[in-house]
Image (tube, rainbow, N blue to C red):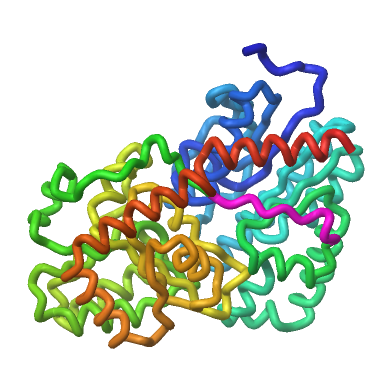
């Protein structure tokens, strides 16, 4: 394979996190950038020197990662603990990335702008236009509507109105707006983005590294103290404000009479402390917690549970789509969705028959579903096969990289 043409327009991705960070947006960007570089495209990434879960780590300012040229700009480093510090981190990344695009972007380059920090398309869209570059907005979530749905007061007032107008203008001016779900596509159309600019490209995972494997053969599962007869309901990743916790806690309480049913939480997030507090308060010995796992361990950790669960508050449908869906399906595991039955994940698991949807607050329904699945191993095996088939036919890594490559060809050919 020939190397990238130095005179060709470059693909420049911008996001606050990139490899070796393990946050969801970072992993998705890393896979897409490396995949496109492997096809011979000149790919750059503009990012910060921070890590999502440890702001004290300082990554190198320049690096070459599997053919991807990485430039890390300076930012403040307050981390995620406080709202003021986080806002300053956002502002400093806006400024540093804006100045870097003004300095480095060339006419004809394609700037692919993600949504961490929120509304990044507003300043970088302006910088790209000044330099004669094209823009592609890659929406992983939608702000300020997400903040408004989570009760952030400023998002509902004049500041929120101004932010929405600026965001909508950046959507209208972009060459393409990439969304990750049908509900999000509907939102973006309502915001005024031309239909011709909207492309649905799903998220994905490394489906070659994550493969279905029997739980009984999982060495990590055994080392964490689970027996072959345990029936493990798992959650992997960030447990944050957008997710429902009370329904699964209620189910864990209702199922405490089944000694073999265990609930495993792997990861972190805003609600993790509440989870531990509630488990202690309710004396729920069937809840086990573990920290985030390194990416090279995901093939093992995602295969520990017999069933996974995911949740999303109904008010956030179309604004967020939990990407953990893809790793779960790649591992060949059934999925219990706690949320809107008509949302994106609800539609996917029903259409492809690898899970079930339970409304938020339906504790009795959820606990009944878990009891039923615990007693139906053949059903679980079939749903697991269906989950893997969904990945291979709709959201494999190679398939999605090919979609990105075709999309970028559209933009470059205009």
Depicted 301 relative to depicted 19: above or below: below
In-image side of 268 versus 168 (left or right): left
Rendered residue at 61%/27% (across/down): 68
Which image quadrant for residue 177?
A: bottom right
Which image quadrant for residue 414?
A: top right
Rendered residue at 83%/62% (across/down): 193
- The magenta segment is 194-203
User: Looking at the image, which is closer to me, 265 or 270?
Assistant: 265
Magenta region includes residue 232: no
User: Looking at the image, which is closer to me, 396 or 145?
Assistant: 396
Magenta region includes residue 201: yes
User: Looking at the image, which is closer to me, 377 or 204?
Assistant: 377
Depicted 347 relative to depicted 323: above or below: below
Rendered residue at 32%/70% (across/down): 273
In-image side of 93 versus 213 (left or right): right
Q: Is residue 339 visible?
A: yes
Rendered residue at 38%/71% (across/down): 356
């Amino acid at each position: 394979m020939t190397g990238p043409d130095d005179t060709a327009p470059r693909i420049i991705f911008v996001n606050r996190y990139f490899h070796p960070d393990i946050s969801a947006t970072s992993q998705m960007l890393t896979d897409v950038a490396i995949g496109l570089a492997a096809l011979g495209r000149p790919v750059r990434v503009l990012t910060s020197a921070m890590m999502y879960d440890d702001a004290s780590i300082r990554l190198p300012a320049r690096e070459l990662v599997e053919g991807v040229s990485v430039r890390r700009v300076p930012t403040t480093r307050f981390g995620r603990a406080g709202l003021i510090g986080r806002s300053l981190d956002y502002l400093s990344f806006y400024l540093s990335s804006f100045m870097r695009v003004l300095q480095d972007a060339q006419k004809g380059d394609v700037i692919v702008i993600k949504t961490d920090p929120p509304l990044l398309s507003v300043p970088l869209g302006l910088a790209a236009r000044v330099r004669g570059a094209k823009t592609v907005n890659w929406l992983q979530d939608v702000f300020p509507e997400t903040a408004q749905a989570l009760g952030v007061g400023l998002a509902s007032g004049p500041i929120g109105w101004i932010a929405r107008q600026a965001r909508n203008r950046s959507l209208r001016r972009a060459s393409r707006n990439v969304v990750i779900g049908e509900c999000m596509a509907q939102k973006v159309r309502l915001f005024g983005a031309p239909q011709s600019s909207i492309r649905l490209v799903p998220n994905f995972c490394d489906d070659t590294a994550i493969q279905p494997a029997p739980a009984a053969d999982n060495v990590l599962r055994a080392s964490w103290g689970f027996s072959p007869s345990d029936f493990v309901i798992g959650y992997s990743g960030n447990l944050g404000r957008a997710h429902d916790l009370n329904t699964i806690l209620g189910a864990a309480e209702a199922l405490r009479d089944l000694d073999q049913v265990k609930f495993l939480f792997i990861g972190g997030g805003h609600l993790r402390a509440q989870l531990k507090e509630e488990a202690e308060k309710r004396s729920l010995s069937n809840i086990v917690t573990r920290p985030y796992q390194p990416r090279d361990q995901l093939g093992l950790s995602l295969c520990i549970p017999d069933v996974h669960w995911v949740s999303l508050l109904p008010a956030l449908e179309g604004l967020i789509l939990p990407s953990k869906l893809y790793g779960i399906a790649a591992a060949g595991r059934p999925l219990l969705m706690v949320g809107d039955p008509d949302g994106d994940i609800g539609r996917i698991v029903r259409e492809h028959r690898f899970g079930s949807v339970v409304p938020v607050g339906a504790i009795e329904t959820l606990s009944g579903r878990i009891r039923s699945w615990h007693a139906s191993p053949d059903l679980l095996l079939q749903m697991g096969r269906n989950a893997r088939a969904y990945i291979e036919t709709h959201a494999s890594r190679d398939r999605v990289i090919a979609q990105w490559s075709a999309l970028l060809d559209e933009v470059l050919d205009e």
